[in-house]
Amino acid sequence: MKKALVFFVLPLWLLIVLTSCEKDFLEESPTTAVSASSATSTTDNLFLIINGIHRLMYERQESNGRGGYSAMMIQNDALGEDLVMNARANNWWISMASWNDHTSATDSDLRHGWRVMYKVINNANIVIEGADGAEGPEAQRDAALGQALAYRAFAHFFLVQRHAERYRMGGGNDQPGIPLVLIPTTEGLPRSSVEDVYAQVNEDLDRAITLLDGYTRPNTSHINQQVAQGLKARVALVQGNWNVAAEFAVQAREGFSLMTNDEYRSGFNDYSNQEWMWGGYYNEEQGSTFTNFGAWMSRNFSSSNIRGNPKSIFSVLYETIPETDVRSTIFSASGEHENLPAGYEISSAHLRFPYTSQKFLSISTGDSRGDVPYMRMAEMYLIEAEAKARQGAGGAEALLPLAENRDPSYTLSTNTGQTLIDEILLQRRWELWGEGFRFLDLKRLDMALDRTSRDGVETNHKPALLNGLMQVAAGDPRWQWLIPQDEINANPNIEQN
């Protein structure tokens, strides 16, 4: 039988070597002899693997534009309407925004997410399989196992949303999902049903939430119980389990505080922010100058992509944000950025376009580092509000703390029914712009992509740059990412979309 999943499943010793962040562990055993059993022999070693997974979330894979999960965040927004590409620059993200990459089975950017997420899954499986035999404190074992389960759930959940048909709320979901990989393996597996994938994701998250009870993490890059609860709320929202979504969103945000308006304008680059529940941290030794999230999404770093193709908000969306709302101030309608925070600057070589974002700022024009937001408290308010609005009670009240924090002139909404849901979804677009949600939101809501002018506002999308891709109907087959051709070639048990 052919060895399948060849581009993300490596021999177990090599998986650990490639993803471990700790040089001393690698030096203790020859790299050709490090087995999964020795890698999981102690709870300290379990955490070396967990730290390796953290690094996979932002680590460069093959080329500058493939920086782990942070690159996938950009992909998800490039596919939507709310993130605007202004010019070709060095060509990155233009093909994705044109819906060419994820519809080509041989495309390297399509392969990127599949490869990285199954690396996450297989490393998590090494911890899950070996945790019981690891010597060390029980609390440390539980913390490593809980994080591994949460990561496995996170990766499966991400992949099934991309590569399968959307989850049908209240209906049968026997459509092909993705391979459920629950043990370290190099053998090709068939696609499980979407329902089975979601069942496993929920099972893993439930176990993680229990195991992480009482765990105090060293920093925000680690997954604690509240992050696992936040993931549970996300999954429940996609499945239409409104009570569960609202309940876990409330639990997840306990102990966090919404940032002030001054903090909101300060560059979204510090994972110690009181509102950030989970984030990626770049130190000076890790990451890559032209791979970091800030090398593509900040306004001020001096890369060829940012100088030539600064990212804008969709003009139609921007014009819906009240001037009194702080979220209107992190975009420059003129493109001149008259109100950049103190200490930041852009050069004369940075091209100017209307509606450009200054939400994300890197350390400087010469340093692309900046932490990456994976989960924030604000998202939990939005999940609770949407879930309650769809149940017909409490949605406006749930939205109020977030909305009035961002806009002091906001008052309790009098909207009801679908009008209230639409208001909450609009707030979600304002709040989570650039954080990797839009394509998946459009898909889960069974909405069309529409980048055209409307409501009296001219679009700032450029059809010629996007090969004319301005609209895609809901339900179009292109909402499903293809399975990478390398996987099809290597795995006799899998079928293409």
Image (cartoon, rainbow, N blue to C red):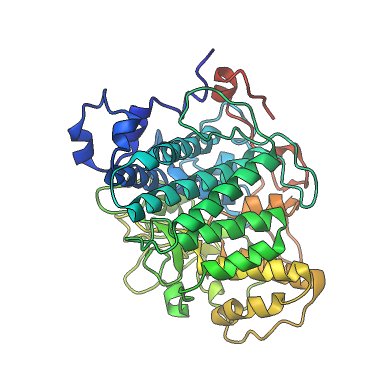
Q: Residue at x 61, y 18 (%)?
A: 492
Q: Quadrant of residue 426?
A: bottom right
Looking at the rendering, which quadrant does residue 56 occupy?
top left
**Viewer can see residue 465:** no
At a point 23% along the width and 35% down the height, the residue shown is 26
Vertical comparison of 20 with 275: above or below: above
Residue 422, position as x, y percentages in the image: 74, 68
Q: Residue furthest top?
A: 1
In-front residue for pair 272/453 = 272
Q: Residue at the spot x=36%, y=49% of the render? A: 141
Residue nearer the viewer, 385 or 64: 385
Residue 253, above or below 350: below
Report whether 199 appears left or right of 205: right
Image position of 200 (left or right of 5):
right
Residue 35 at least partly seen:
yes
x then y, percent, for residue 395? 71, 74
Rendered location of residue 254, percent (x, y): 50, 73
Q: Image point 74% across, 71% down: which residue? A: 389
- From the image, which quarter does the N terminus lie in? top right
Residue 436 higher or lower than 190, as above or below? below
**Above or below 484: residue 252:** below
